[in-house]
Image (cartoon, rainbow, N blue to C red):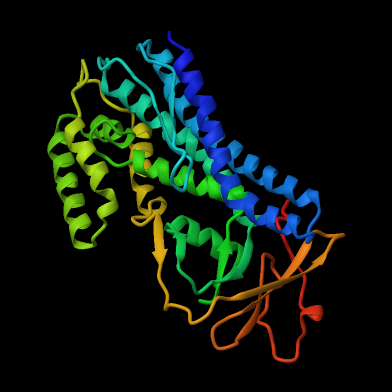
């Protein structure tokens, strides 16, 4: 079994996921450190934030791939070690991982166990990361500026509402690094659960329906094409092209007559239905706003003992507000000077 390339890619994916988070966190912390606003501890906390994201996401992906790999050993099917896919560009740092496997699957039961073991094994740490990550996240003002935001699947919306209740339109959740890793794990898991081709969902779908799954998979594929065109979800075009080239119809097993147990049928249906609450059709949303007439001005006041900072932003029309990271945010009110503005924790998370 070849192990050098999988090991190199595994280490590279650690580095790209860590580097992605540091690219977001470290510059801001360094600016405050350079101007004497915060101590070196804040820089260290930014590095720890990156490690939290990277470790949580790599745990999710490793559990997912080990679920597949262990089942291939159980059924004595030749397979490679997981090939992790580093992605230095983009919002996630990785495109997941794949396993090269012998296409001669003995029966539908083996196909089902191999296909579903990865999503189940990866979904457990994903849900744990989402639970604790959202618990450790912050409520912040919704900035009215050009930028990028994350799509929110139903499951994430329900969990946020459970922890924080309904949020007003001018407030949003700043995800903790562990919650961000859970969001990425949820996206990759639900993508893999699409019931077409050689995806995990395609394996499960064929195991449930047998050769009838081929016609149904093409029907689902055409529905996806229509949805992409109608709702202008052009960012999924490349994925659909790849699915069409690889094959929408799943190949048969050596013995399709071997039935699934009732428990497997139930679990398979539940996993495929999970896509409805775990998937978001627009993972990355680009926000546009009216052009500003002048550049905003920023000042800060620091409580060095708590690594906290109050940031004062002067918006268009001289509407001053206090922004930052924390739970005790409130709009700036006339007559409140910067010296009495509320302190807001900066990168000070559990």
Place of residue 254 in the rendered image (x, y in percent of width and height, measured from the top left): 21, 15
In the drawing, does residue 49 fall left or right of residue 59? Answer: right
Query: Could you say which is closer to the camera, residue 211 or residue 96?
Result: 96
- At 26% from the left and 19% from the top, the residue drawn is 107
Place of residue 161 in the rendered image (x, y in percent of width and height, measured from the top left): 55, 65
Place of residue 127 in the rendered image (x, y in percent of width and height, measured from the top left): 54, 45
Query: Could you say which is closer to the camera, residue 109 or residue 201?
Result: 201
Query: In the rendered view, would you say 323 is above or below 52?
Result: below
- At 69% from the left and 43% from the top, the residue drawn is 48
Q: Quadrant of residue 37?
A: bottom right
Query: In the rendered view, would you say 110 is above or below 304?
Result: above
- At 37% from the left and 24% from the top, the residue drawn is 114
- At 21% from the left and 57% from the top, the residue drawn is 227
Q: Quadrant of residue 142?
A: bottom right
Q: Quadrant of residue 86?
A: top left
Is residue 36 visible in the rendered structure shown here? yes
Place of residue 55 in the rendered image (x, y in percent of width and height, measured from the top left): 60, 36
Query: In the rendered view, would you say 42 is above or below 17?
Result: below
In the drawing, does residue 153 fall left or right of residue 143? Answer: left
Can you name the residue that lies furthest to the left here? 215
In the drawing, does residue 283 fall left or right of residue 207? Answer: right
Query: In the rendered view, would you say 290 is above or below 54?
Result: below
In the drawing, does residue 288 fall left or right of residue 241? Answer: right
Is residue 70 visible in the rendered structure shown here? no
- Quadrant of the frame with the N terminus: top left
């Amino acid at each position: 079994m070849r192990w050098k390339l999988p090991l190199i890619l595994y280490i590279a994916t650690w580095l790209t996921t860590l580097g992605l988070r540091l690219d977001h966190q470290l510059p801001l912390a360094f600016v405050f450190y350079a101007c004497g606003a915060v101590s070196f501890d804040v820089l260290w906390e930014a590095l720890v934030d990156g490690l939290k994201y990277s470790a949580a996401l790599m745990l999710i992906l490793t559990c997912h791939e080990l679920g597949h790999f262990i089942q291939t050993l159980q059924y004595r099917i030749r397979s490679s070690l997981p090939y992790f896919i580093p992605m230095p560009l983009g919002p996630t740092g990785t495109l997941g991982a794949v396993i090269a496997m012998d296409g001669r699957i003995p029966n539908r039961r083996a196909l089902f166990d191999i296909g579903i073991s990865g999503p189940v094994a990866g979904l457990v740490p994903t849900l744990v990361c989402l639970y604790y990550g959202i618990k450790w996240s912050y409520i912040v003002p919704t900035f009215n500026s050009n930028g990028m935001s994350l799509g929110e699947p139903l499951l994430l919306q329900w969990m946020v509402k459970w922890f924080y209740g309904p949020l007003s339109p001018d407030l949003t959740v700043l995800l903790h690094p562990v919650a961000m890793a859970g969001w990425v794990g949820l996206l990759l898991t639900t993508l893999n659960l699409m019931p077409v081709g050689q995806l995990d969902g395609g394996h499960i779908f064929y195991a449930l329906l047998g050769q009838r799954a081929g016609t149904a998979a093409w029907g689902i594929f055409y529905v996806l094409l229509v949805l992409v065109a109608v709702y202008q979800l052009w960012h999924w075009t490349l994925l659909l092209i790849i699915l069409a080239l690889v094959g929408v119809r799943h190949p048969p097993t050596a013995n399709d007559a071997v039935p699934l147990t009732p428990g497997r049928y139930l679990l398979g249906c539940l996993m495929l239905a999970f896509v409805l609450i775990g998937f978001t059709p627009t993972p990355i949303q680009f926000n546009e706003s009216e052009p500003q007439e002048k550049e905003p001005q920023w000042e800060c006041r620091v409580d060095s003992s708590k690594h906290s900072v109050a940031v004062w932003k002067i918006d268009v029309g001289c509407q001053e507000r206090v922004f930052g990271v924390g739970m005790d945010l409130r709009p700036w009110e006339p007559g409140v000077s910067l010296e009495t503005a509320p302190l807001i924790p900066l990168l000070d998370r559990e």
